[in-house]
Image: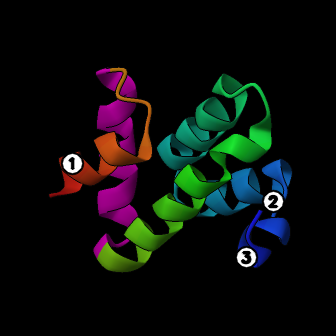
């Protein structure tokens, strides 16, 4: 696991996501729960953080809501929606 990923826990990732918006938190929880081991979802959640810096909170939350609606439950789905 990369150094940056080691400093995060599932609960810390979800807390961060909740500061962005409820849809981001729901998607982060879903990503972490859908993996056999939550650590396998860290990169996707950290990717969402990067998207927040690039597109802003409002757009990311809206994109996550759309991804949840269409069951596109991945970082790539959200990235595609934003593009």
Q: CA distance from mark 1 to mark 2?
A: 25 Å
With respect to residue 12, does 30 lie above or below?
A: above
**Between disc 1 and disc 2, whose residue precedes?**
2
The answer to whether mark 1 and mark 3 are in CB contact below 8 A is no
With respect to residue 82, does 39 lie above or below?
A: above
Looking at the image, which residue is at 37% across and 37% down? 65
The answer to whether mark 1 and mark 2 are in CB contact below 8 A is no
* Residue 3 placement (x, y as % from top left): 78, 77
Q: CA distance from mark 3 to mark 2?
A: 13 Å
**Between disc 1 and disc 3, whose residue precedes?**
3
Label 1 belongs to which residue? 80
Q: Is residue 62 magenta?
A: yes
- Determine the secondary structure under disc 2: helix
Q: Is residue 51 magenta?
A: no
Label 2 belongs to which residue? 12
Question: Magenta part of the protein: which range?
Answer: 55-70
Q: Which mark is residue 4?
A: 3
**Quadrant holding the N terminus:** bottom right
Packing grade of label 1 (10 A; few <14, some 14-19, many >=20) is: few
Q: Main secondary structure of the magenta part?
A: helix
**Between disc 3 and disc 2, whose residue precedes?**
3
């Amino acid at each position: 696991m990369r150094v940056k990923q080691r400093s995060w826990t599932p609960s810390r990732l979800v807390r961060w996501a909740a500061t962005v918006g409820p849809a981001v938190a729901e998607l982060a929880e879903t990503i972490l729960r859908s993996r056999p081991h939550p650590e396998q979802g860290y990169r996707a959640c950290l990717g969402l953080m990067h998207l927040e810096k690039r597109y802003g909170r409002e757009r990311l939350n809206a994109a996550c809501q759309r991804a949840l609606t269409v069951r596109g439950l991945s970082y790539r789905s959200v990235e595609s929606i934003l593009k």
